[in-house]
Image (cartoon, rainbow, N blue to C red):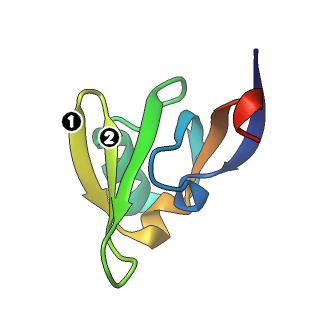
Amino acid sequence: MEKTKLMVLVDLKPGQKGKVLGVAGYGAVRRRLLDLGMRSGETIEMIKSAPLRDPLEIALNGGHLSIRRSEAALVSIELLMDIKSE
């Protein structure tokens, strides 16, 4: 059985997955995130953070992307987790 928690992409830990709920912001930054495929309903996974915490490596749509922490903070997600792992 699964339960959900609402958060932003930047808060995911490596190995955690979430479902994209929406992208905040405006202008070129928002457009870039949407162009990268961060649309509602997509499953996203945090792979790792660079040694100085920026950029973040994520898996989305079968590929790996690097985005800034400031951009990841604009992506609302629903954390997908198993109750046993709490």
Report whether 21 appears left or right of 5: left
The spot of residue 13 in percent (x, y) is 53, 56
78 and 36: which is toward the camera: 78
> Are dots 1 and 2 in contact, CB under 8 Å?
yes
Location of residue 59 in the rendering, given as x and y in whole percent from the top left corner = 32, 40
Q: Residue at 40% of width from left, 78% of height from top? A: 53
Task: Please tell me how many numbered marks the rendered image carries.
Answer: 2
- Of residue 77 and residue 84, the one placed in the foreground of this image is 84
Would residue 5 be found to the left or right of residue 55 on screen? right
Task: Report the residue at 37% width, 49% height from top.
Answer: 33
Look at the image and tell me in which quarter the C terminus lies. Answer: top right
Amino acid marked by disc 2: Ala
Name the disc covering residue 23, or none: none
* Residue occupying the far front of the picture: 84
The amino acid beneath tag 1 is Gly
Residue 51 location (% of width, % of height): 31, 80
50 shown above or below 24? below
**Viewer-nearest residue: 22 or 47:** 47
In front of the other: 13 or 38: 13
The residue that appears at 45% across and 45% down in the rendered structure is: 15
Q: Examine the rendered structure and indicate whether residue 56 appears above or below residue 8.
A: below
Q: Secondary structure at mark 2?
A: strand
- Residue at 36% across / 69% down in the picture? 68
On the picture, is 25 further left or further right than 60?
right
Give the residue pinned by disc 1. 63
Crowd band around label 1 with a 10 angstrom C-alpha radius: few (<14), some (14–19), many (20+): few
Q: CA distance from mark 1 to mark 2?
A: 6 Å
Name of the residue lying farthest toward the top: 1
- Which labelled disc corresponds to residue 59? 2
